[in-house]
Amino acid sequence: MTGAALEIVGIPWATKTLGLRLHHEESYSAIDAGQASALPAELAIAELIQPGLRRNPRRAHLLVSTVLGKHLPTDPRVVLDGANRLGDLVRELLGDREALVLGFAETATGLGHCVAARIGAVGYLHSTRRDVAEAQTLTGFEEGHSHATSHLLQPMPADIFVNDLPLVLVDDEISTGATALDAIRALHAFSPRSHYLLASLVDMRLAADRIAFDKAAAELEVSIETVCLASGRTVLPDGLVEAVAELPEPELNPVAAQRGSFERIELPWPATVPEGGRHGILRADLTAFDAAVVTAHEVLRSRLELAFPGRPVIVLAHEELMYLPLRLAAELADSGTPTRYQTTTRSPAYVLDEPGYPLRRGFRFTAPESDQEAPRYLYNAHWTAEFSGQPDGAAPVAESVDPVLVVVIDPPADTAALVADGGLVDVLTASGADVLVAVIPGADPRALHAARGGAAVARALPEPLHGPEFGSYAAEDVSWLLQDLSDVDLEADVAERERRIQSGVAHYAESLPIEYQPDAAYRSLFDEVLADSAERLALAVATVAELVVAERGDDIVLVSLARAGTPIGILMRRWLRSGRAAGSLDVPHYAVSIVRDRGIDAVALDYLACHHDPSSIVFVDGWTGKGAITRELTEALDAYHAAGGARFNDELAVLADPGHCVRTYGTRDDFLIASACLNSTVSGLVSRTVLNDTLIGPGEFHGAKYYRELADDDVSQRLIDAVTAAFDAVRAQVPAAVAAVRDSDRTPTWAGWASVEQVRAEYGVASVNFVKPGVGETTRVLLRRMPWLVLVRDAEAPEHAHIRLLAAARGVPVEVVPDLAYSCMGLIKDVQQP
């Protein structure tokens, strides 16, 4: 062996006083000659661990690592180098084979992550003692000598670890190997594989323990290999448990004459990047993880330079969140900040302020997690020659310069208990330390499930449809997340279709109404309406588009609810790309299906989650009636998320909100929107969407038809072009219109729904589904359904002139109701009534 990792001064106190000895047997290394390293090529047991104590009747000794950064504040580059050494030994055994890596909580969560990154593992998972309700527990196992014994495995989804790849299990030490064998048996029962490899910094097994490994391998008919930086034996004197019990009570939570300061910072972290291995981290996540670490480090370093200029830092990881804080510490060290790293723990150890004993100072504090009761511990958290734990031999920071303690936590630990009396911040500041709490957002396991499900099936997901092959809109205007059912006979007689829907025999989305084509007089009226309302439409489009950007940012993806939302989404995209004065934004635009009582197309959501950040998705519709689709969207997105899908923002953006159902709108006026005047001929020649189990299978988008035969009557592009041409005329009005909306009370009151209930009661309508409020919905009743009655507030109002024409053509009575909440309402005939 060459070099010396740590200068051992005299005999360790536990050896000299109690006879607890660490015996070295062999060192191992896979380091290349001349490779830069903070450590020598080989390390002895005495350089890797020091003997400590704990009051535990099952195990009274504690092996304190000098390269793990748990009990001793350690240079983070040394921690990484020691872990990389172990990873190199693993890679030497694996050769070119792919592998998965499992780290043991809590001590080896960071070490295992380091090994996985070093070998480029397909995926990394660590066991956890935090039972996350949103995650499914794959399996678990027990650890005999640990203070907290139960380990859970909660990868999301579980099937990313269901394969026959070699599994590398990583722990800081192997004392007997019983924990590893329990884990192997549990994992093998869930997903058998042929090869297991146990990697540890030190291997302290006796001959009998090694025989147990051979027996387990034969029993399971698998290969179980081991690898370590050094092997040895722990020599335990008789009566050690009793001797430790007789030692004086340890003094915890030292108090200084002057309390230190406390500050807090929230570090940026992408929602789609796992912050650690609790629910698994895949090789595909590593690039994004590394980039996120750099960004978070820059924010942290700026705060430290501003608040604590020139001060050294000890980065404190909390429990299982170890790897990310380690990486932040390494970034700080590389940027020139004197930095050490260590972690809190669940395990109580014996503290004694004696030279030659590694646990000189201790803190006991209340667990900050709201669902935990047992206390937590931290040791040393100081930076002098005696507390440094510096196997690289670097000179310690002068004792007159106190380090800043940066406590890195995730949201479950960010509770009132963290700063309450007896909490971690309280006991550290009471010792005189200045504390900066840095909060890292935690990944939602359900979002990881959705993202990984999408990544796993990305090639299997259907592709969007585009014009001119599907629909008459240009390919750049919209990507339809739909299945083409153009060749399927889906149209049914209106009366028969209505009867089946109302009787509950069929759902309205299982078939299509025959595309009603109005007469020449009505089509002429459409041209007049479009000419008269183009600027009003343009202003509403620009207003809602700018409102979305103001509140959601530039990085957005428009997703229209087909089909009424599609023309509005196209126009919003056109405005953002070419209409606005603030600069061009070229945003993607999709159209997806949503069906009342059936929800939104989950396969389309999978596609969006796979190709875009779910937080960037903005759902768009044409208008609100009573708010049924608004509620359907919220319920459907909640259900998708609860089932393991990504979390999408359910705030719907609409051109017009006469029902007062949303916060994001261009206007709340109930006026004539030209795109509501017709059916497919104003909507890209695409039908209403279809959800029919006989046609739509698992993993397929909802369907729709492209009515190519109606091309001669198509006015879809005429609408888009007319409104786009009006952008110049309204551009100067847009800032004031946006400000007016933002300054108003936009709280949804659902006034439209209340009005519908009133009409339903007054007219004896069986269901609110038979009452369609507003110009757009009333138009749909006359074009698609069996209308019974049309109610109007003003007999001659121009916004429903086309409705009066349609009603006359179909023989539907029009009744004037002066106090109507909307300009008009359409009532559907109840075909169940005689």
Image: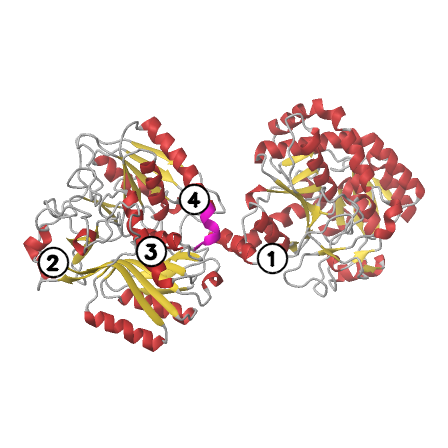
Label 3 is placed on what type of residue?
Answer: Asp
CA gap, disc 4 and disc 2: 41 Å
Q: Residue 180, image x and y in percent?
A: 30, 65
Label 2 is placed on what type of residue?
Answer: Arg
Q: What's the residue at 39%, 62% (across, down)?
A: 95
Q: Which residues are magenta?
A: 280-287
- For the N terminus, the quadrant is bottom left
User: Does the magenta stretch mainly form a helix, a strand or a loop?
Assistant: helix
State the residue position of label 2. 21
Q: Which residue occupies the extreme top position in the image?
A: 732
Q: Is residue 165 above or below residue 324?
A: below
Q: Residue 715, image x and y in percent?
A: 84, 41
Q: Which mark is residue 290?
A: 4
CA gap, disc 1 and disc 3: 34 Å
- Closer to the N terminus: mark 3 or mark 4? 3
The answer to which image quadrant residue 805 occupies is: top right
- Closer to the N terminus: mark 2 or mark 3? 2
Residue 283 counted in the magenta span:
yes
What secondary structure is marked by label 4? Answer: helix
Using a 10 Å C-alpha cutoff, classify the residue at mark 3 as few (fewer than 14 neighbours), some (14 to 19) or many (20 or more).
some
CA gap, disc 3 and disc 4: 20 Å
Q: Residue 137, image x and y in percent?
A: 42, 61
Relative to 167, 606 lies left or right: right
Q: Residue 3, image x and y in percent?
A: 19, 48
Q: What's the residue at 36%, 62% (across, down)?
A: 168
Using a 10 Å C-alpha cutoff, classify the residue at mark 2 as few (fewer than 14 neighbours), some (14 to 19) or many (20 or more).
some
